[in-house]
Amino acid sequence: MPLIISLARQCAIAHLQGMRAYALNLVWIAIAAAPAAAEPELVAERAVVVGRVDDGPWSDAPTEARIDQKAELAAVVIGHRGRRRVVLAPDGVARVSLDGRSVAAEPLGEVRVQWSTVEPHGFRKTPATNGATSEFYSNVSTEPKTFGHWLGFDHIDYFERVVAPWGAAARIPAAVSSGEDGAQQLPGLGTVRFKVEVEVAGRAAASPGAEATDTFGVLPAVHRVSIRRGDDFLGWLSSYLLVPEVFGSAGGGRNHQTERFTGADCADVLVGAIR
């Protein structure tokens, strides 16, 4: 009798184990057959211009290069898929530095891109809001009786110029040019800023443009490209070409108009080049 009971128990255990294995197999089959969960839709929040020199890292910091170096720009889109933040970049751009932090980038994929320059008018196009009477920008009076008297920061006029229309590549050369006749004194040298517009996943995203200004001029968020002749004093001085004259240029620390390449007078531009 005990032998019969033992055999019955063993049969029951084997049966249960078989049922469990069968149930697990059914679970795995169901998982394999189920369609993969759809990835959340991309929501593009903004576009950013990044640049690099030669084979250096891609960064949203200003792109500064000698004219004999290869300077390049790329369109980057920042957004999210569900709760996950994503950074999208063109082929060949695996990592980008944003606000000083290196992050991995995912493929940008099929997009439409347009590039524009953001440029200052060399001379004012609208009346000065600070009372300056000169044709050039001035923070101080140029009138004989009040010469040098502080008037406050002059308003610098900016405009956008399409340089690569819709359908352009997401990576372009960081080339310096001007939209004003006679403004460019030395071809390819000086400072200009870039804006990019991107259509991705049915949404439009853009980097800051001519509207992005503060007291001192165009904001650092508008990507600056400065191309110089060389690494000596005259070379760095050439990077200030196309930066408008602002008589009595001013500002504290990094916000000085010369430091930001938004404006400079004849003395400050020399100091800027030496630095």
Image (spheres, rainbow, N blue to C red):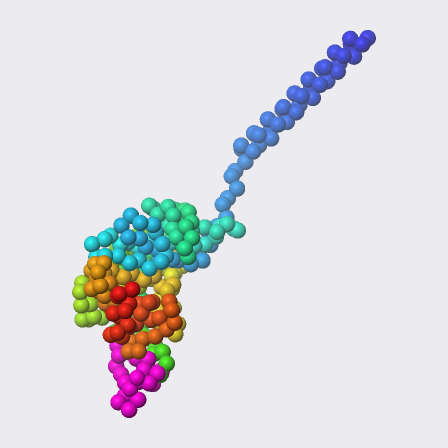
Residue nearest the observer in this picture, 89 or 60: 60
- Residue at figure coordinates x 38%, y 63% from the top left: 221
> Which region shows up in magenta?
123-150
Total marks drawn? Answer: 0
Give 167 or 268, whichever is nearer the viewer: 268
The image shows residue 104 at horizontal and vertical percentages of: 42, 47
| 159 left or right, relative to 9 | left
**Is 4 above or below relative to 56?**
above
Viewer-side residue, 208 vs 254: 254
| Location of residue 108 in the rendering, given as x and y in whole percent from the top left corner | 38, 49
Residue 53 falls left or right of residue 95 = left
Task: Answer whether residue 10 is visible to the viewer in this image.
Answer: yes
Dominant SS of magenta comes to: loop
Residue 199 figure quarter: bottom left
Q: In percent of the image, x 23 and y 66: which residue is there?
A: 237
Looking at this view, name the residue that lies furthest to the bottom: 145
Quarter of the image where one finds residue 188: bottom left
Tell me if residue 101 comes above or below residue 135 in the rendering: above
Determine if the magenta segment contains residue 260. Answer: no
Confirm whether residue 112 shows in the render: no
Q: Is residue 146 highlighted in magenta?
A: yes
Q: In the figure, is residue 230 to the left or right of 200?
A: left
Percent position of residue 112, x then y: 34, 54
